[in-house]
């Protein structure tokens, strides 16, 4: 496809050249036009990530302007004030080379992975709006707004390079004025040239920083929402931690890694473009400045001598940096992991502070925390050792950078081949080219860190995908059925490592009939409940659930979110779903009258309420949600027997339509259920539910 487009591009260029030849009789513009055509073909070629395509697009557009300027110049139609800005032919060539490099880079698998994350934002169709000063509110898709901001920022960055090029000439003219002792020219250069340029520079820098921050935060907000959504949807967050440790600390990946990814993608890509543009511009200058240079100690002229020296010097530095710094990638990855583990341990301790205090577990906790922190230190010290070596090399290299251009040019100055201004300009251009080529060296740590961040995001995405894929493959199937009962057939429930724990075949939970599930601890009762609610994927077989009926499962230890008591009771209902009167009523019914008028109170409820109170709060949730099926997994085990009896009474009274299935160990529970199923160990070593005859009520 690309070849077809390239051929079409080349054909069009041919036609344009022919037309030009007849009109102008001028073929010297062949090169810029040809390279412009190539850039266009690159831009049009399919399958380039959008983020990179934007860069090629802007480069092509800028290149078109430069070529147009050259054409106008050839035709003698460029206004006087613009003639100084007619670019040398090398500029469009440079832009095309850079576009081609981007194109080639976009074929590299790791870059495609990186760009796929970026493109989730830049290709988004979600409606959005942005307020632009002097223009007002503009509505467009989020992807379009992001793209527009990116285009704007690329243009600004290119503009900054152009300003630097102009300043390089200012340096030459000013030093020449000094050498000639021409005071008039000197002051003109200072106030007529430098001051206006500096003013433009400051304004552009201000606009750039604001636009850049706006783009970054929009981009982050978008990806953040997306990741949070993917993590939370379909119980992925739960199943992800069941399948292994590849995607450890998802909180860290969403909160930290996404931010780093966006910051670094922006900084590195813009930096790379900036440095490439600098490189192209200053190589052109350096090339022309090399004109008078001969091989040292001889009269043999070497075209572009300074350029070659500069490139060889930088390549050597880049290669050495890579060799020394490569282990940093893995070390940074590991650092993120141990830091997140430590943070999580602290947060967990905060959650369980009461249990730790009661058990007097402080010493054990301290030891565990110190051990975890020791891993941070250990890995960090490896980073330090590696960074130290890198730093020794880089510092030496950068110190040498200061003097190398003087060493190269001074001999030519002393024998009068170049003026002081030219020498100064050469040193400036050499440093700019050097700086651009050193981009990789200066950014090595960032790049190493970036790679670690990208790996963490891609493993996160891969884990999300694994969870979704496992949906389709071998797993317990939940099948909605028109039958009012819940039927289990051919079910085998396994552990994450594949070991089968229990089996159940031909078991029915009948609508309207309360069932008590009993059995030894560890026999898989809770896991069967998890399978019925669809969050436990491991195993095989089918569970037919009555369609369009709601289910609610209350575990032994309820989850209580941070926030007000109202939010705790109405969870997982959305804000405003129940009015306060109903909430208070539910709390009173669940034997928590003292809480009924404290709905606005915000505190760590999971730490202040007793377990029995938390369990009653969960019952209040069920009373509000009115599910068709209510599964109670030892959900009243912390209550005294009379209160437990009252709660079952309330459930029967307030939720007469609900089918209750309970798990419990207490014998008194049997009285509240119509039927009992017991988990029994079978001959094959697996547990299976067996119908148990209810004892006749005592006469
Ligand atoms: N995420 C998990 N990873 C590995 N094993 C698990 C996981 N969850 C549960 N198990 C194991 O599955 C088995 C059954 O656990 P389950 O909680 O279903 O038992 P139970 O019958 O409800 O026990 P109890 O009466 O003590 O609550 C246990 O041996 C438990 O260790």
Image (cartoon, grey):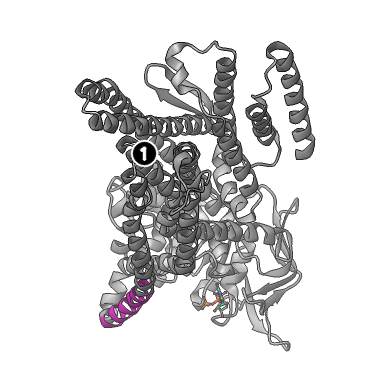
User: Which quadrant of the figure has residue 6?
Assistant: top right
- Whether 21 is drawn above or below 254: the answer is above
Q: Residue at x 66, y 74 (%)?
A: 494
Q: Is 235 left, or right, of 170 in this rendering?
A: right
Provide residue 254's location: percent of width, then percent of height: 46, 53
Between 41 and 402, the residue placed more toward the observer is: 402
Q: Is residue 689 visible?
A: no
Q: Is 630 left, or right, of 680 in this rendering?
A: left
Quadrant occupied by the C terminus: bottom right
Q: Is residue 228 visible?
A: yes
- Whether 51 is drawn above or below 682: the answer is above
Identify the magenta region.
363-380
Q: Is mark 1 within 8 Å of ligand 1?
A: no
Q: Is 648 left, or right, of 204 in this rendering?
A: right
Could you tell me what secondary structure mostly forms the magenta stretch?
A: helix
Provide residue 417's location: percent of width, then percent of height: 38, 40
Q: Residue at x 64, y 49 (%)?
A: 549
Q: Residue at x 33, y 43 (%)?
A: 413
Provide residue 227's location: percent of width, then percent of height: 52, 49
The picture quadrant for ligand 1 comes to bottom right
Q: Residue at x 43, y 62 (%)?
A: 558
Under tag 1, what secondary structure? loop
Between 613 and 563, the residue placed more toward the observer is: 563
Q: Residues within 10 Å of mark 1 (few under 14, many from 20)?
A: some
User: Which residue in the structure is indicated by mark 1?
Assistant: 418
- Whether 37 is drawn above or below 273: the answer is above
Q: Is residue 311 magenta?
A: no
Q: Is residue 364 magenta?
A: yes
Quadrant occupied by the N terminus: top right
User: Which quadrant of the figure has residue 96?
Assistant: top right
Q: Is 572 left, or right, of 581 in this rendering?
A: right
Provide residue 338's location: percent of width, then percent of height: 40, 70
């Amino acid at each position: 496809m690309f070849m077809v487009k390239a051929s079409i591009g080349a054909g069009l260029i041919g036609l344009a050249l022919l037309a030009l030849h007849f009109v102008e009789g001028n073929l010297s513009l062949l090169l810029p036009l040809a390279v412009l055509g190539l850039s266009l073909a690159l831009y049009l070629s399919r399958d380039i990530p959008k983020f990179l395509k934007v860069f090629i697009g802007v480069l092509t557009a800028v290149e078109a302007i430069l070529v147009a300027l050259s054409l106008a110049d050839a035709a003698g139609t460029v206004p006087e004030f613009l003639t100084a800005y007619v670019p040398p032919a090398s500029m469009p060539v440079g832009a095309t080379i850079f576009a081609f490099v981007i194109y080639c880079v976009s074929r590299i698998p790791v870059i495609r992975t990186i760009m796929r994350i970026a493109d989730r934002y830049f290709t988004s169709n979600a409606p959005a709006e942005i307020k632009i000063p002097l223009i007002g509110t503009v509505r467009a898709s989020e992807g379009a707004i992001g793209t527009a901001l990116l285009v704007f920022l690329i243009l600004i960055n290119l503009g900054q390079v152009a300003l630097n090029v102009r300043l390089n000439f200012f340096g030459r003219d000013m030093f020449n004025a000094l050498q000639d002792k021409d005071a008039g020219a000197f002051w003109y250069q200072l106030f007529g040239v430098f001051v206006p340029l500096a003013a433009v520079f400051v304004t552009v820098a201000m606009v750039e920083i604001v636009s850049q921050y706006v783009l970054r935060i929009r981009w982050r907000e978008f990806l953040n929402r997306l990741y949070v959504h993917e993590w939370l949807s379909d119980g992925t967050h739960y199943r992800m931690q069941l399948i292994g440790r590849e995607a450890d600390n998802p909180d860290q990946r969403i909160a930290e890694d996404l931010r780093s990814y966006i910051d670094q993608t922006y900084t590195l890509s813009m930096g790379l473009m900036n440095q490439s543009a600098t490189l192209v511009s200053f190589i052109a200058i350096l090339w022309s400045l090399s004109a008078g240079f001969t091989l040292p100690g001889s009269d043999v002229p070497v075209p572009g001598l300074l350029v070659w020296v500069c490139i060889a010097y930088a390549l050597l530095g880049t290669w050495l940096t890579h060799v020394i710094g490569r282990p940093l990638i893995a070390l940074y990855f590991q650092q993120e992991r141990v830091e997140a583990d430590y943070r999580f341990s602290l947060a967990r301790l905060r959650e369980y502070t009461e249990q730790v205090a009661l058990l007097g577990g402080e010493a054990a906790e301290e030891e565990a925390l110190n051990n975890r922190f020791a891993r941070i230190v250990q890995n960090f010290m490896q980073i330090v050792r590696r960074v130290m070596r890198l730093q020794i090399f880089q510092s030496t290299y950068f110190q040498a950078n200061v003097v190398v251009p003087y060493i190269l040019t001074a001999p030519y100055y002393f024998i009068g081949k170049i003026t002081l201004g030219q020498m100064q300009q050469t040193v400036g251009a050499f440093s700019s080219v050097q700086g651009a080529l050193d981009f990789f060296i200066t950014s090595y740590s960032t790049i190493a860190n970036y790679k670690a961040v990208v790996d963490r995001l891609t493993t996160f995405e891969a884990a999300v995908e694994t969870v979704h894929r496992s949906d389709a493959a071998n797993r317990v199937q939940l099948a909605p059925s028109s039958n009012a009962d819940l039927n289990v057939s051919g079910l085998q429930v396994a552990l994450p490592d594949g070991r089968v724990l229990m089996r159940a075949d031909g078991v029915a939970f009948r609508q309207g009939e309360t069932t008590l599930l009993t059995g030894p601890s560890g026999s898989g009762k809770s896991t069967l409940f998890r399978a019925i609610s669809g969050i436990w994927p491991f195993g095989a077989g089918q569970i037919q659930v009555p369609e369009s009926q709601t289910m609610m499962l209350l575990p032994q230890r309820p989850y209580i979110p941070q926030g007000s008591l109202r939010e705790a009771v109405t969870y997982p209902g959305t804000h405003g779903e129940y009015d306060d009167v109903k909430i208070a009523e539910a709390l009173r019914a669940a034997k928590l009258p003292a809480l009924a008028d404290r709905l606005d109170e915000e505190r760590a409820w999971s730490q202040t309420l007793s377990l029995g109170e938390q369990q009653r709060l969960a019952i209040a949730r069920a009373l509000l949600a009115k599910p068709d099926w209510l599964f109670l997994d030892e959900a009243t085990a912390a209550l005294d027997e009379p209160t437990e009896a009252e709660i079952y009474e309330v459930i029967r009274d307030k939720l007469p339509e609900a089918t209750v299935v309970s798990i419990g160990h207490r014998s008194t529970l049997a009285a509240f259920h119509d039927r009992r199923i017991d988990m029994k160990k079978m001959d094959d070593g697996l547990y299976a539910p067996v119908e148990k005859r209810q004892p006749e009520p005592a006469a």
